């Protein structure tokens, strides 16, 4: 009986140590802070619209590739597996993913999935990541943003060299979950795209 208790205690202590390490390594990035502050200002985008009969209708999710093109990116098919693909069951929904390019140079990647269960997938993603962060993780932000007249969005962003050289940004908004990977060289443009897609 003592061995199972010791194992459980060890796991709990390891979990606490991981959380403490992650918390201690939080730093600030100017682009991240600008992005995260954007919804702290009053906005004018409604979460839902109302029909002539007074019934609320769902807001339409933006055309991702249209926004990508409008902001000067080009795309290529993504061959790498996204974290969303590991979290969302294939029989539940599909994950669209594209590499983002600026003048032929990789700027990052965007992937997204639509489902009424995206809140659950977002929580599962956070739980999975919390156990895989390395001691080098930095610029970690996990917050829920609520702006006046704007939809609530959940943000998780970090840089962890053990997972990728690029920044990860996950955004849950309405019934869509995004995964972005941003090359440091094109991070500013990447955050502009995220802002456009998550209004």
Image (spheres, rainbow, N blue to C red):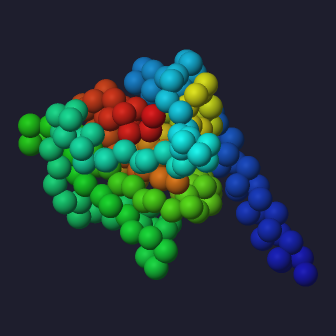
- State the residue at coordinates (49%, 68%): 88
- State the residue at coordinates (83%, 77%): 3
Residue farthest to the left?
103
Question: In the rendered view, does 46 fall on the left or right side of 24?
Answer: left
Does residue 161 appear in this view?
A: no
Task: Give percent across and percent down for residue 30.
Answer: 42, 20
Task: Give percent across and percent down for residue 46.
Answer: 53, 33
- State the residue at coordinates (37%, 45%): 62
- In front here: 133 or 156? 156
**Among the 4 quarters of the image, the one containing residue 101:** top left
Does residue 111 appear in this view?
A: yes
Residue farthest to the front?
53
Task: Give percent across and percent down for residue 57.
Answer: 54, 48
Above/below status of 10 relative to 48: below
- In front here: 127 or 8? 127
- State the residue at coordinates (15%, 44%): 74
């Amino acid at each position: 009986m003592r061995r199972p208790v010791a194992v459980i205690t060890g796991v709990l202590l390891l979990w606490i140590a991981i959380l403490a390490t992650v918390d201690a390594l939080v730093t600030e990035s100017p682009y991240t802070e600008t992005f995260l502050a954007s919804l702290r200002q009053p906005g004018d985008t409604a979460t839902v619209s109302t029909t002539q009969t007074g019934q609320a209708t769902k807001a339409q999710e933006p055309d991702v590739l249209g926004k990508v093109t409008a902001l000067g990116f080009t795309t290529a098919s993504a061959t790498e597996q996204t974290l969303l693909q590991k979290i969302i069951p294939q029989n539940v929904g599909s994950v669209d993913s594209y590499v983002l390019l600026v003048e032929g140079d990789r700027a990052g990647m965007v992937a997204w999935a639509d489902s009424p269960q995206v809140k659950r997938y977002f929580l599962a993603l956070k739980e999975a990541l919390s156990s895989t962060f390395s001691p080098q993780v930095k610029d970690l932000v996990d917050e829920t943003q609520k702006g006046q007249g704007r939809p609530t969005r959940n943000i998780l962003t970090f840089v962890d060299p053990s997972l990728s050289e690029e920044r990860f940004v996950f955004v849950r908004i309405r019934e869509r979950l995004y995964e972005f990977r941003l090359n440091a060289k094109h991070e500013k443009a990447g955050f502009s795209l995220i802002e456009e897609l998550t209004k």
